[in-house]
Image (cartoon, rainbow, N blue to C red):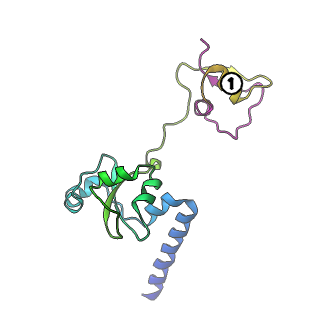
Amino acid sequence: MQPLKNLIIGLSISVLAIAVLLGTWLTVFAEAEIYSYSDHRKALDLETGCTPPDGWSVYRVHPGDTLTNLADQFRIERATLMSVNCIESDIAPGDTIYLPVPEAANPPPACGPPSTWVLYPLEDGDSLSRLAERFGVDEPSLWHANCIDIYTVLQPGMSIYIPPVK
């Protein structure tokens, strides 16, 4: 029984270490008891007294959690977090609150150009910043349309998608 207990403890420590390495928002979910809203709605409404917005999940508060640090991690206002959870003071370990589902759970749409964009052959001296200014778009729009990022090296003769010339 002891080897099994040691294995479980070792795995828990490994998961926590990975979570710390990957960032603070992941730490919240690596230790959290998160349940889907639809599975536990009736029980949770009785416990919290609130109905969460669509897409929010249940989170059991851990030692060290505060409304301010959770609001910062989920990029929402502290007042919004308090309002959604019908609470008037800070939280304590063991409390159950609602948190928004992280953006990573809802990945952005695949990259690619809008249907009206056209191919443009790159010339000497072309850069994304110059093309963005010339065609009236921002650089991230060009990155997304062409499935490239800031590290992509552009070469004369390559073709990229740009907005149509008006």
Of residues 28 and 78, the one nearer the viewer is 78
Q: Residue furthest right?
A: 124
* Drawn side of residue 98 relative to residue 27, left or right: left
Q: Which quarter of the rendering shows the N terminus?
A: bottom left
Q: Which residue is mark 1?
A: 131
Crowding near pointer 1: few (<14 within 10 Å), some, many (20+)?
some
Q: Which quadrant of the view contains residue 133?
A: top right
* Drawn side of residue 85 relative to residue 128, left or right: left
How many callouts does the rendering have? 1
Q: Residue furthest bottom?
A: 2
Indicate yes or no whether the magenta region holds residue 97. no
Q: Which quarter of the rendering shows the C terminus?
A: top right
Determine the residue positioned at 36% across, 51% down: 79
Residue type beneath disc 1: Leu
In what element is the residue under mark 1?
Answer: helix
In the rendered image, residue 72, in percent from the top left (x then y), is placed at 46, 54
Indicate yes or no whether the magenta region holds residue 152. yes
* Drawn side of residue 155 relative to residue 18, left or right: right
In the rendered image, residue 88, in percent from the top left (x then y), is placed at 29, 59
Determine the residue positioned at 64% across, 36% down: 148
Determine the residue positioned at 47% across, 79% down: 9
Boundaries of the magenta span: 139-166
